[in-house]
């Protein structure tokens, strides 16, 4: 394997930026310049030594630390996801930025490049080991960013107010401390887990402070590890049905059904539904969704997450599909709207057509209920009211969230 050189690193950085520009992920000169100038290999040296420089510039997330159970604790996020979030953060030179979750320090380096020498970046991580490693990597790269050890859920009041706050791990709620430490008119961006029982899709809103409230101004979607106070933040969903394949090297999931809808099913019903989903024992139901493309896939699934009652909702993953479903416990039935697309499976989002399925398993009225929700969604789209509105407010430690659809 040839040794890395500065010229080869720069060439690979430029190629990555060109790909992200072609996919319309990077659109601004500031974000493009940051990804072009900041060498990622300085922040993930283990991957560099293990797989080489080309692996560093694949558009992939890299797990950098795991707990004793093998669950991921920290990672260097997928560059495309980082670029999306930086674009929505609308950074300007001279701004003060708080990053919650230092990780490897790579994102702090990108932030610092964008805000420039007149700006200020403070990154907080609850893990002392990760904070030390990020501080060392930033120092060796000559990046002027401050890394502190602390619980990011409390923010970092010592350097507030901030023009921008970016959270790089998913949260179940929005903390009042973040609102209080954000300058009026400033932006808070975070991955928000709408389903704490394990749905893969997370809403990533960019929220502007206006007085004592936060209002949605832009958003994207993705998947991040949970924000935590030092314990890794992982917890099993309330109920999960899962079929796995075990081998000598690793264990892989064939299909997973998780969420509140699974709780309360009898063992017989649970086994029957898991077997039906695993073997595909259902005929696709005609549902008129073929005209909804890849760009609308996440928003439709978010709509279902927000409208199906939590006690009857499930997330279904497996076979390259991601779906949200509703359970009819009385009759032991399940209906799932799932999507197979590059967006759901990690491939090229812009070159493959999204394929929807509405499947019914078992008996009961679940399919009819899900079809009714899909018709409501179509009505929202026809009326131009499929835009999500989100407001965060309140005086408690955790802000109240209000979702609505419309202009």
Image: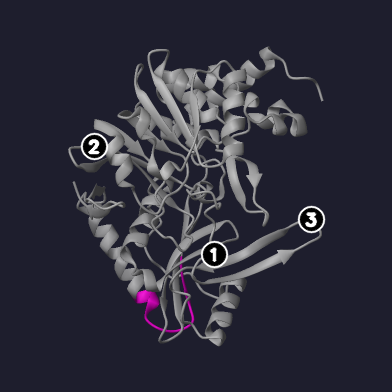
* Viewer-side residue, 374 vs 36: 36
Task: Where is residue 190? Give x, y as percent.
Answer: 39, 42
The residues tagged by marks 3 and 1 sit, at their Cα atoms, a distance apart of: 23 Å
- Would you place residue 346 above or below residue 159 in this image? below
The residues tagged by marks 1 and 2 sit, at their Cα atoms, a distance apart of: 34 Å
Which residue corresponds to the image point at 37% horizontal and 61% vertical from the top-left?
A: 305
Q: Give the side of residue 35 with respect to residue 371, left or right.
A: right
Mark 1 nearby-residue class (10 Å; few <14, some 14–19, many ≥20): few
Residue 217 visible? The answer is no
Q: State the extent of the magenta-drawn residues as a range.
A: 358-368
Task: Where is residue 15? Give x, y as percent.
Answer: 59, 22
Is the C-beta separation of discs 2 and 3 under 8 Å?
A: no
Q: Report which residue position mark 1 lands on.
A: 236
Numbered label tally: 3
Q: Report which residue position mark 2 lands on.
A: 209
Looking at the rendering, which quadrant does residue 330 occupy?
Answer: bottom left
Q: Report which residue position mark 3 lands on.
A: 249
Mark 3 nearby-residue class (10 Å; few <14, some 14–19, many ≥20): few
């Amino acid at each position: 394997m040839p040794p890395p050189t500065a010229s080869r690193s720069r060439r690979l950085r430029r190629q990555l930026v060109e790909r992200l520009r072609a996919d319309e992920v990077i659109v601004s000169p500031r974000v493009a310049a940051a990804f072009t100038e900041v060498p990622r290999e300085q922040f993930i040296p283990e991957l560099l030594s293990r797989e080489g420089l080309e692996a560093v510039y694949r558009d992939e997330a890299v797990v950098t630390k795991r707990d004793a159970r093998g669950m991921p604790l920290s990672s260097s996020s997928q560059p495309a996801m980082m670029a999306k979030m930086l674009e929505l953060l609308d950074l300007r030179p001279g701004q003060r930025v708080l990053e919650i979750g230092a990780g490897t320090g790579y994102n702090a380096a990108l932030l610092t490049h964008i805000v420039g020498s007149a700006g200020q970046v403070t990154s907080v991580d609850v893990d002392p080991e990760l904070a030390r490693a990020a501080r060392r990597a930033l120092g060796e790269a000559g990046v002027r960013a401050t890394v502190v050890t602390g619980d990011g859920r409390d923010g970092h009041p010592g350097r507030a107010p901030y023009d921008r706050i970016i959270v790089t791990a998913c949260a179940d709620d929005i903390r009042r401390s973040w609102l209080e430490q954000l300058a009026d008119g400033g932006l808070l961006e975070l991955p928000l887990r709408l389903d704490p029982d394990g749905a893969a899709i997370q809403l990533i809103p960019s929220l502007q402070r206006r007085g004592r409230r936060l209002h949605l101004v832009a958003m994207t979607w993705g998947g991040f590890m949970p924000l935590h106070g030092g314990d890794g933040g992982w917890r099993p969903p309330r109920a999960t049905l899962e079929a796995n394949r075990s081998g000598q090297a690793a264990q892989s999931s064939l299909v997973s059904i998780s969420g509140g809808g699974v709780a309360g099913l009898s063992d017989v019903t649970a086994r029957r539904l898991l077997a039906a989903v695993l073997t595909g024992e259902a005929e696709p139901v005609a549902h008129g969704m073929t005209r909804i493309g890849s760009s609308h896939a996440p928003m439709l699934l978010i709509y279902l997450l927000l409208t199906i009652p939590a006690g009857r909702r499930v997330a279904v993953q497996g076979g390259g599909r991601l779906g949200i479903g509703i359970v009819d416990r009385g009759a032991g039935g399940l209906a799932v709207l799932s999507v197979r697309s590059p967006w759901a499976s990690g491939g090229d989002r812009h070159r493959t057509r999204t394929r929807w399925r509405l499947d019914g398993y078992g008996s009961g009225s679940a399919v009819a209920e899900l079809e009714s929700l899909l018709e409501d969604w179509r009505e929202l789209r026809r009326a131009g009211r499929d835009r999500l509105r989100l407001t965060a407010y309140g005086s408690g430690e955790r802000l109240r969230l209000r979702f609505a659809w419309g202009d």
